[in-house]
Image: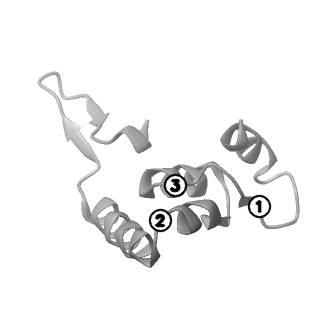
Amino acid sequence: MRLHWTAILFGNVKSDIAITGGVHTAEDIVKSVMAGATVAMMTSARLEHSIGHARRMIADLEEWLLAPRLSTDRAGARSPQCSACI
């Protein structure tokens, strides 16, 4: 629901948008930003895990950013490679 309303509000309000709950993985961060959020807050994930969790998220985001996004199937159609792209 957070992503849905973020996408609706993005471009229709003159302020930054923050996703403030349910962000625990790098994929959650990617989805938040793709929906239009300026920031994705991970306080509960940080408290639940350790500082190492933040390091893992940075590494996972770097991996996501460097990974190829689209492939061509036999018919020549392009399809997303990752679940966050769908």
Q: In the image, what residue type sits under mark 2? A: His
Q: x, y percentage for residue 30?
A: 49, 55
Measure how far apart labels 3 and 2 are at the Cα level: 10 Å
Residue at numbered disc 1:
17
Q: Residue furthest left?
A: 74
Q: Is residue 10 above or below residue 42?
A: above
Residue at numbered disc 2:
49
Residue at numbered disc 3:
24
Q: x, y percentage for residue 63?
A: 28, 64
* Foreground tag (1 vs 3): 3
Taking the image as shown, residue 9 lies to the left or right of residue 46, namely right
Q: Is residue 68 above or below residue 73?
A: below
Task: Please say if the residues under marks 3 and 2 sit with CB atoms less than 8 Å apart.
Answer: no
Image point 32% across, 59% down: which residue?
64
Is the residue marked by circle 1 packed among few (<14), some (14-19), or many (20+) residues within 10 Å?
some
N-terminal of the pair, mark 1 or mark 3, is 1
Mark 3: which secondary structure? loop
N-terminal of the pair, mark 2 or mark 1, is 1
* Foreground tag (2 vs 1): 2
The quarter of the picture where the N terminus appears is top right
Q: In the image, what residue type sits under mark 3? A: His
Q: In the image, what residue type sits under mark 1? A: Ile
Q: Quadrant of residue 26?
A: bottom left
Mark 2: which secondary structure? loop
Image point 51% across, 54% down: which residue?
24
Taking the image as shown, residue 7 lies to the left or right of residue 44, namely right
Image point 27% across, 34% down: which residue?
78
Q: x, y percentage for residue 66?
A: 26, 65
